[in-house]
Amino acid sequence: MVVRVCQDGKVWTATEAQELREMHRIVCGTGGICRFNCNKASEHRLPLQLTPEQLHVGRVHGFLEQAEKEVAVEAPAATASWWSVAWQAVTSLFSTNEPQTRLESEPTTEPTLSNVPLRYRVFEDLWSQGFFITSGSKFGGDLLIYNSDPRTAHATAIIFILPSSTLSPQDLVAYGRLARAVKKNCTLAYINQAGDLRYTTLTHASTTSRAGRPRVPRG
């Protein structure tokens, strides 16, 4: 099933919102609740506002179709008389311009990883690894990842997307303290010198349990 969304990324039907959640792990950025009362049925939590990263993943993997922007067509002026239209038709017969017989098509370039924003790459990679993903602003990060539906599970890691693979000792200590404070793994996503997406996970002792360490991103 291909879900058709509005130009601004909204999904208005409960059936499609449920399809995205259960089949494609696409949830609202705040954990799936787009309205304040989480006890109400799905139709009371609409519309589902998708993020640009979610739209990117949906288009790339073929389960989202975004409506094209409608272009307003201006109606002819009411003051235009019939003879002015007729005169334009007559003068067009004596036009000296040769008809264009060949249209030059603009070269099309396939999207490459270098053209994809880093945030989109990270989101798609985490999604491909089977995680549920929401906004990480609650804990000061970029993203939160879950092993299962956010309505029934806690986030296992905070994702920070770094513009550079170079990290100062002060920043490293700060991320470690954050992991301890919120009792979650702190995963740093960055591009290495070879242009590959990599993750470094900081795990504090308080984030582990007897059941073992929670699953973290690969790479």
Image (spheres, rainbow, N blue to C red):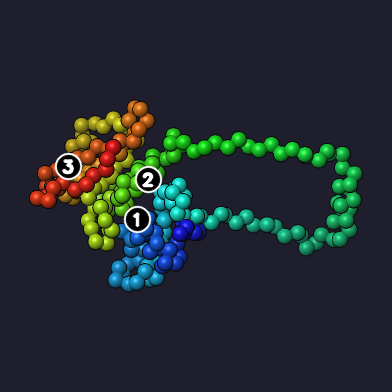
Question: Which marked residue is nearer to the observer: mark 3 or mark 2?
Answer: 2
Horizontal and vertical percent position of residue 59:
47, 50
Marks 3 and 1, how far apart in space? 25 Å
| Pointer 3 or 2: first along the chain | 2
Along the line of sight, which residue is nearer the eye, 93 or 209? 209
Q: Is mark 1 on a helix, strand or loop?
A: loop
Question: Would residue 173 be visible to someone looking at this image?
Answer: yes
Marks 3 and 2, how far apart in space? 23 Å
Q: Quadrant of the C terminus?
A: top left
Query: Label 3: how many residues lie within 10 Å, few (<14), some (14-19) or many (20+)?
Result: many
Which residue bears the numbered disc 1? Answer: 25
Q: Which mark is residue 203?
A: 3
Query: Label 1: how many residues lie within 10 Å, few (<14), some (14-19) or many (20+)?
Result: some
Residue type for callout 2: Glu
> Could you tell me which residue is drawn at 35 percent across and 43 percent down?
125
Which residue bears the numbered disc 2? Answer: 124
Q: Residue 86: which quarter of the image?
A: bottom right
Question: Which marked residue is nearer to the observer: mark 3 or mark 1?
Answer: 1
- The reply to whether discs 3 and 1 touch (Cβ–Cβ < 8 Å) is no
Q: Residue 52 carries which label?
A: none
Horizontal and vertical percent position of residue 4:
49, 59
